[in-house]
Image: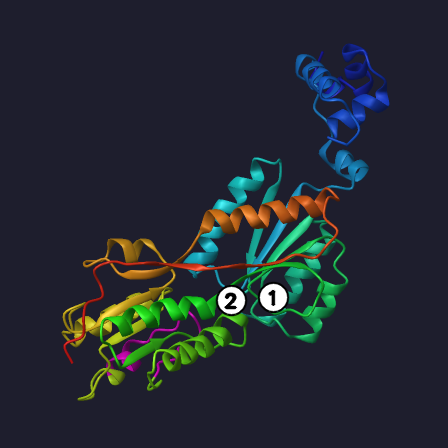
Amino acid sequence: MSGSKITIRDVARQAGVSVGTASRAMNEAPGVMEQTREAVQRAARELGYQPNAAARALRSRSSRLIGCLFSDLENPLYTRLFNSLQDRLADEGFVTLITASAGKLDREKQAISIFAERGMDAIVIAPGHQQDPEIVQLLEKFPAPIFVLDRDIPIQADRLVFDHFAAMDLAVGHLAKLGHRSILPVFSHQNTRPGLMRHAAFDAAMRGAGLTPGARVEPETPNTPVFREVQAALSCDDRPTAMIVQGTHVLPSTLNALANLRLRVPEDISLIAVGDSALAEEHVPPITALRLDRSALVEEITARVLARIRGQATEVSEKVLGYQLMERASCRRSIA
């Protein structure tokens, strides 16, 4: 018989169970014994049964789709995270869809609305407009679980935030122990949690090390070129002896500026990247970096999202993920 002519009734008869039990087993509904579920699935395979995906989603109220809204896919963190997240969720039978807003408010509002219309089982979000009233309103009305990634959005939702203060303590402390007194930060100052927290954390870490924050380079976005700005900051007689640089496109732009000034890493200036990447690892010399544990990040998101979808979570969860300092050859003792 052709697979298109096989019905759930045929599967139930082959497995020796009721139609209702066969339907629940095929839809992975709770309350079905594992032995029965396996028998139904085996019968479906033997008969070549192909369930109607749309009808199954309607019956189970599940689309098997999870949406991701990130502010910027040029940020290596989000690209790597999505690749890992879609692999992990695929193992659980879900397809993960992604959209990037490039920091545009209208695009973020549209994405959230479409995710709701398409019946996503859950969404993972890191938008560029964390306090916008319309964004907040759309999320408050969103009909499925929401997981917020390192954003201060005033809604009741599970979230994971990064410990930017501890990260800056690690970076500044490492450079201070090497005798560096003047450290140039090069990272964006956007109105989202990472940008706001990172600058406040850097200033606090400097004061904690007995140092005075000085000049800084603040690209408009995490991917704005800083070639001219870095050159200007390092062209003075009392230039900084160390830098902490955002590990997006800001990092290669900074490295180009250093090369143009004929400043060597680490002989002339020490360098730490915020966020680890292939560039940081493969650069000559390799660049010391603040690294997030991507495996822990993916497992936390997956566990909370699946728990919400399956009705296994009741309390709102907020967890903090710290950075590791990956010490490499881009830092040395200051001779200034």
| Residue at 54% from the left image edge and 72% from the top image edge | 192
Q: Is residue 220 visible?
A: no
Secondary structure under badge 2? Answer: loop
Q: Which residue is mark 2?
A: 102
Q: Percent from the top left, x then y, of residue 64?
A: 67, 41
Query: Crowding near pointer 2: few (<14 within 10 Å), some, many (20+)?
Result: some
Between 206 and 23, the one lying in front of the other is 206
Amino acid under disc 2: Ala
254 over 217 or under it: above or below: above
How far from the left and from the top, in percent, is residue 48?
Answer: 67, 17
Query: What span is colored magenta in the figure?
Result: 216-231
Between disc 2 and disc 1, whose residue precedes? Answer: 2
Q: Mark 2–mark 1 contact, CB under 8 Å?
A: yes
- In the displayed structure, does residue 325 sit left or right of residue 269? right
> Which numbered marker is on residue 107?
1
Instruction: In this rendered view, identify the residue nearer to me: 226 or 244.
Output: 244
Percent position of residue 233, x then y: 27, 84
Residue 98 among magenta residues: no
Left or right: residue 54 compared with residue 79: right
Decide whether the magenta segment is chiefly helix, strand or loop.
Answer: loop
Q: Check the image and report above or below for 272 versus 231.
A: above
